[in-house]
Amino acid sequence: MPAKKKTVNRTGLIYPTGRTRRLMKKQLGKKTRIGETAPVFLAAVLEYVNAEVLELAGNSTKEHKRKRVINRDIALAVKNDEELHKLFAHGTFASGGVVPNIESQLLPPRKKTKKGGASEQY
């Protein structure tokens, strides 16, 4: 009789489905019934959200010409993405800072340039 494959190997996920099931039972109570696919689905969703956040944070890290993802990169990635911002609306990131934004009224007035002036060279 061949050995039974673990759920993680069958699903192809990185997140552990067994641990997810155990934590669900712990959180919901021992008497609550949990289906066979519920922890698999939850692990898949967590893996997807994590991959999405890390991809955006990695892009932010590359923009700032660094090699390590820091808390600020994750916070900026979440705040700049509309759907993730909605998901993490009530959460805070340690050392995340704020999104850089300067009100247009506080900026110095722009100097007007003459069109077709002698300063333009082709």
Image (cartoon, rainbow, N blue to C red):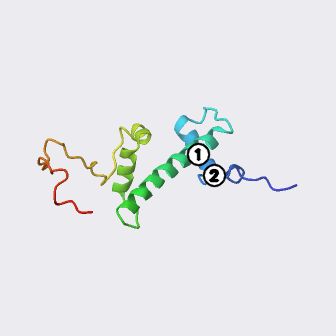
Judge from the rendering whether residue 116 lies leftward or rightward of residue 26; answer left or right: left
Question: Which image quadrant: the N terminus?
Answer: bottom right
User: Which labelled disc corresponds to residue 43?
Assistant: 1
Q: According to the image, label 2 marks what residue?
A: 13
Give the percent coordinates (x, y) of residue 82.
40, 39
| Disc nearer the start of the sequence (1/2) | 2
Amino acid at the residue labelled 2: Leu
Q: Residues within 10 Å of mark 2 (few under 14, many from 20)?
A: some
Q: Quadrant of residue 41?
A: top right
Q: Residues within 10 Å of mark 1 (few under 14, many from 20)?
A: many
Give the percent coordinates (x, y) of residue 49.
51, 46
Judge from the rendering whether residue 65 lies leftward or rightward of residue 114; answer left or right: right
Residue nearer the viewer, 47 or 111: 111
User: Residue visible at 61% across and 32% down?
Assistant: 31
Q: Is 66 rendered above or below residue 24? A: below
Residue nearer the viewer, 78 or 120: 120
Amino acid at the residue labelled 1: Ala
Give the percent coordinates (x, y) of residue 71.
36, 56
Q: Residue furthest right?
A: 1
Q: Are marks 1 and 2 in contact (CB under 8 Å)?
A: yes
Judge from the rendering whether residue 48 lies leftward or rightward of residue 91; answer left or right: right
User: Which labelled disc corresponds to residue 23?
Assistant: none
User: Residue visible at 61% across and 54% down?
Assistant: 14
